[in-house]
Image (cartoon, rainbow, N blue to C red):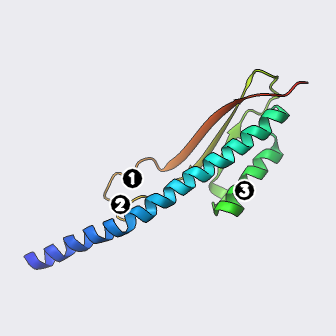
Amino acid sequence: MSQTLAKWMTLFLVVTIMFTPILYYLDTLHRKAVDAVLQQGLKEASIVGYMSDEIVDKMVNTLVNDYNFDEDVIDIAGTILYTQRKDYIEITITVPRTPVFILNIFNQGSKKLVRKSMIMSEYVG
């Protein structure tokens, strides 16, 4: 009985040690992808003065086509009113996180990845 228990515990540790670095790397790549798309959307929105539907569609398409996110789970919110120069435009992107541990017995952290940022508007109108 003790040998069986030791083998199962060893298997549990081996699976955790094997897959955790890969899953953590994937989670890091998703974070960087969301950050890159957020920064690009902020730049475009600062010129236009608000978050237009075209900018949101472009951000979603980039996440879906370039980074393989599911379109149905991406939530992008931002300033939808024209914002004059020297006021701030805010954008928030929310996507689900990938698990970091293959076995769901450890604290996985937040289930969603939320990135929020602001930029000064350059719109003069």
Above or below, comparing residue 74 to residue 43 in the picture? below
The x, y position of residue 112, in whole percent, is: 52, 48
Q: CA distance from mark 2 to mark 1?
A: 7 Å
Identified at 58% across, 51% down, the residue is: 32
| Farthest right residue in view | 125
Q: Which numbered marker is on residue 91? A: none
Q: Which residue is mark 3?
A: 62
**Element under label 1?**
loop
Q: Are marks 2 and 1 in contact (CB under 8 Å)?
A: yes
Label 1 CA crowd tier, 10 Å (few <14, some 14–19, many 20+): some
Q: Is residue 51 visible?
A: no
Residue 117 located left or right of residue 55: left
Query: Which of the image's four quarters has the C terminus?
Result: top right
Say which residue appears at 38% left-offset and 63% top-offset: 20
Q: Residue at x 39, y 53 (%)?
A: 108
Q: Amino acid at mark 3?
A: Thr
Q: Amino acid at mark 1?
A: Gln
Graded by Cα atoms within 10 Å as few (under 14), some (14 to 19) or many (20 or more), the crowding at tag 2 reads few
Q: Hey, what amino acid is under mark 2?
A: Asn
Q: Which residue is mark 1?
A: 108
Q: What residue is disc 2 on?
A: 104
Local SS, label 2? loop
Q: Residue at x 64, y 61 (%)?
A: 67
Badge 3 element: helix
Between label 3 and label 2, give the one nearer the viewer.
Answer: 3
Q: Residue 7 location in percent, x, y?
A: 18, 77
At which x and y percent is residue 99?
44, 59
Q: CA distance from mark 3 to mark 2?
A: 30 Å
